[in-house]
Amino acid sequence: GCVVRVEDNEGMGFTYSEYESGVYRVDLDERFLGINKAYTLYVITPDGEEYQSDYDSLLPCPAIDSM
């Protein structure tokens, strides 16, 4: 029953849907994710408590050179 939302440092965001009790999912647009962006997670509980994470960034991944 929470409201869960992720936002980037440019103000774009997506709200998660509750898939089952306590499990939230969202389909993120590929353009939303990026190495030079930072993200925060907001949670508002049914009791009205609000939580927000610090902003954090994705780390670059090295290229795959073999399999």
Image (cartoon, rainbow, N blue to C red):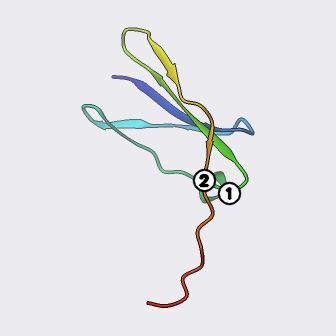
Q: Is residue 65 left or right of residue 36?
A: left
- The residue carrying pointer 2 sits among few (fewer than 14), some (14 to 19) or many (20 or more) residues within 10 Å by Cα, namely few
Viewer-proximal residue among 37 and 61: 61
Displayed quadrant of residue 49 = top left
Q: Which residue is mark 2?
A: 58
In the picture, measured across the screen, residue 7 lies left or right of residue 67, that is right
**Number of labelled discs?**
2
58 is higher (above) or lower (below) than 39:
below
Residue 54 position, x and y percent, is: 59, 31
Number of the label disc, if any, that sits on residue 9 = none
The mark that comes first in sequence, 2 or 1, is 1
Mark 1, residue position: 35
Q: Residue at x 60, y 53 (%)?
A: 58
Q: Residue 43: x and y, percent?
A: 46, 24
- Tell me the kind of residue under disc 1: Ile
Where residue 9 sits, quadrant-wise, is top right
Q: Quadrant of the N terminus?
A: top left
Mark 2–mark 1 contact, CB under 8 Å?
Answer: yes
Q: Secondary structure at mark 1?
A: loop
Q: Residues within 10 Å of mark 1 (few under 14, many from 20)?
A: few
Instruction: Work out which quarter of the rendered image holds the C terminus and state it.
Output: bottom left
Q: Position of residue 25 (x, y in %)?
A: 39, 43
Q: Secondary structure under badge 2?
A: loop
Residue type at tag 2: Leu
Q: CA distance from mark 2 to mark 1?
A: 5 Å
User: Would you identify the image quadrant in which residue 45 lies?
Assistant: top left
Left or right side of 48 for 30: right
Whole-percent x and y of residue 30?
60, 59
Which residue lies at the image location 49% right of the left edge and 91% below the top edge? 66
